[in-house]
């Protein structure tokens, strides 16, 4: 995971929408897909980019994969932005 990957993942509006869904709690890929007009392959692509960037994590439970927001990476981004603004 690199900062560049994280910023690139955040640059996509659909990925930001997925993150917004996950801030309410863990969801399966199917539950995420139901919120979009995209193919399952496209959802899977976006999830893989978010996971590679460290923005989400996954856990397998029986036949499902649950996705969760990884807030610590977002906190790092926010700290970096705050530092750019000259914050303490």
Image (spheres, rainbow, N blue to C red):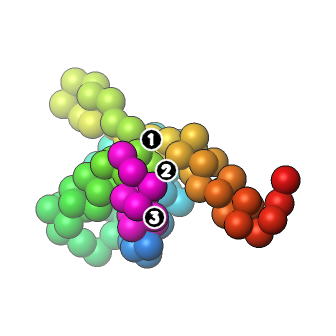
Secondary element under disc 1, as helix, strand or loop, is strand
User: Magenta region's main secondary structure?
Assistant: helix
- Mark number, residue 7: 3
Going 34% across and 70% down the picture, which residue do you hit?
36
| Lower position in the chain sequence, tag 1 or tag 3 | 3
Q: Which residue range is magenta in the image?
A: 1-10
Rendered location of residue 72, percent (x, y)? 57, 40
Are the residues tagged 1 and 3 within 8 Å (C-beta)? no
For the image, the number of numbered tags is: 3
Q: Nearer the viewer, residue 79 or 35?
A: 79
- Between disc 1 and disc 3, the foreground one is 3
Going 44% across and 49% down the picture, which residue do you hit?
55
Please name the residue that numbered disc 1 is placed on: 68
Q: Is residue 54 above or below residue 78?
A: above
| Lower position in the chain sequence, tag 1 or tag 2 | 2
Going 49% across and 44% down the picture, which residue do you hit?
69
Between the residue at mark 1 and the residue at mark 3, the CA separation in whole angstroms equals 18 Å
Q: Is residue 68 above or below residue 85?
A: above
Between the residue at mark 1 and the residue at mark 2, the CA separation in whole angstroms equals 6 Å
Q: Is residue 77 left or right of residue 56?
A: right
View extreme (top): residue? 62
């Amino acid at each position: 995971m690199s900062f560049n990957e994280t910023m690139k993942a955040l640059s996509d509006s659909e990925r930001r929408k997925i993150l917004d869904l996950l801030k309410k709690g863990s969801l399966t890929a199917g539950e995420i897909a139901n919120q979009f007009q995209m193919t399952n392959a496209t959802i899977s692509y976006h999830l893989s980019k978010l996971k590679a960037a460290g923005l989400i994590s996954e856990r397998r439970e029986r036949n499902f994969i649950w996705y969760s927001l990884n807030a610590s990476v977002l906190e790092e981004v926010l700290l970096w932005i705050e530092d750019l603004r000259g914050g303490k």
